[in-house]
Amino acid sequence: MTTEQLRAFLQVAHEGRLSIAARGLGLSQSGLSRQLQSLEAELGTRLLVRTPNGAVLTDAGERFLPHAQRALEALSKGTSELERLSSTPQGGVSLGTLHTVGAYLMPDIIPAFAQRFPEVRPRLSEGMAPALEESVARGGLDLAIISLPVRRADLVAQKLWEERLTLVVPRGHRLARQGKPVALGEVVEESWVVIPGMSGTRALEAECEARGVTPRLALETDNAEGIRRMVERGLGVALVPELMTRDHQARGFDVVPLVRSPKRQVALVHRGEGYLTAAARALKTFIVDSVRVMPEPWGRGPR
C-alpha cells in the first residue's frame, strides 16, 4: 500500500467523480483508476462503485475512509518532523489566497521570497475563504490568507491586517465628481460588477436587503483583476477592499470613500506548527514580516 494509492482514494471520496479527482491529483483518469484498483487488490475488497452520478463508497470504503485519512495525516506529520531537522527550507509549499490578495499583494511578496529562498517552490492558488479554509483543513494547502472569521476550530489563525471596503467607479463618474464620501445606501441602485461571496458583495447584498431592493448586477466574475478592468471600461461600479485601490491615480478608475465603510479582517491560517514543513514555516514568517513593514495600502481615509 502506497501514499499515492491512499491519496487517490481520498481524493475520489471527496470529489465523488474520478475525472475531477484525477485533475486535482495531476493524473490521467486511467492512471487514477489503476491506483484505485491496486489499492482494492491490496485490501482484497471493493472500496468504490461507479454509478451514473459518480463514484460511491461501498460499506468497506466508508469504514476504511477515516483510517486512510489518519494514516496520511500521520505520515505528513512525520515528514514534517524530519524536514524540521533541515536548516534550509526546500521543496514545495502551497499557499491559497483570496482573489484580491493574490492579484494585488502577492506580486509584492512572492518574488522577494523566491529570491531569498531559491530552493523553495511556492504554489499559489486563489479562491473564496470557505473553500480555502476547507482545503487547509484537509491538507490540500499548507497556508491560506483568508478573511475572518475562521469557521473551523482546528485551524490556527494569525491576523495580518484590517481594511475598509471602498467604492470604485469609472474615471469621471458623477459620484467621483461630487468630491465627498457617500453612504452605501445612496448607491445601491447603481450597476454593479461583483465577485459572488466576496466581502464587498456580501456588504452590498445586506444593504440591498435592508432597503428592499435587488442589486443590479452588470457582471459576476471570479477574477479580481477582471473587476478593475470592467469598472475602467464603464460597465459598472464595484465595492472592493482598499488593497485594490493602490496607485488608482495611474489607473482608469476613481475611488469614492464610503461613510461608515464596511471592513474586512484578513488572516493567515494553517493547521498548526506541527504540520508545517520548513518551507511552509519560512513562507509564513516571510508573509507576516512583509505585511508588518509595508505601507498600509488600505489607508486611513474618511470614515
Image (tube, rainbow, N blue to C red):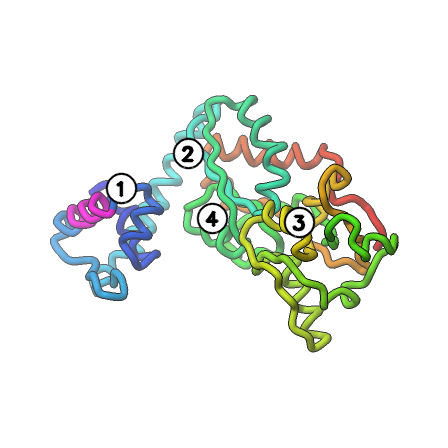
- Asked if residue 31 is among those painted magenta in the image, a careful observer would answer yes
Marks 2/1: CA–CA distance: 20 Å
Marks 4/1: CA–CA distance: 19 Å
Marks 4/3: CA–CA distance: 36 Å
Q: Earlier in the sequence, mark 1 or mark 3?
A: 1
Marks 2/3: CA–CA distance: 52 Å
Nearest-to-viewer mark from 2 and 3? 3
Q: Earlier in the sequence, mark 4 or mark 3?
A: 4
Marks 4/2: CA–CA distance: 19 Å
Report which residue position mark 2 lands on. 81
The front one of 179 and 40 is 179
Which of the numbered marks, if any, corresponds to residue 144?
none
Q: Quadrant of residue 211?
A: bottom right
The C terminus - image quarter: bottom right
- Asked if residue 146 is among those painted magenta in the image, a careful observer would answer no
Name the kind of residue labelled 1 in the image.
Answer: Glu
Residue segment shown in magenta: 29-39
Which of the numbered marks, if any, corresponds to residue 4?
1
Q: Is residue 251 left or right of residue 74?
A: right
Q: Earlier in the sequence, mark 2 or mark 1?
A: 1
Name the kind of residue labelled 2 in the image.
Answer: Glu
Q: Residues within 10 Å of mark 3 (few under 14, many from 20)?
A: some
Q: Earlier in the sequence, mark 4 or mark 2?
A: 2
Marks 1/3: CA–CA distance: 48 Å
Secondary structure beneath disc 4?
A: helix
Q: Earlier in the sequence, mark 4 or mark 1?
A: 1
Report which residue position mark 4 lands on. 136
Report which residue position mark 3 lands on. 233
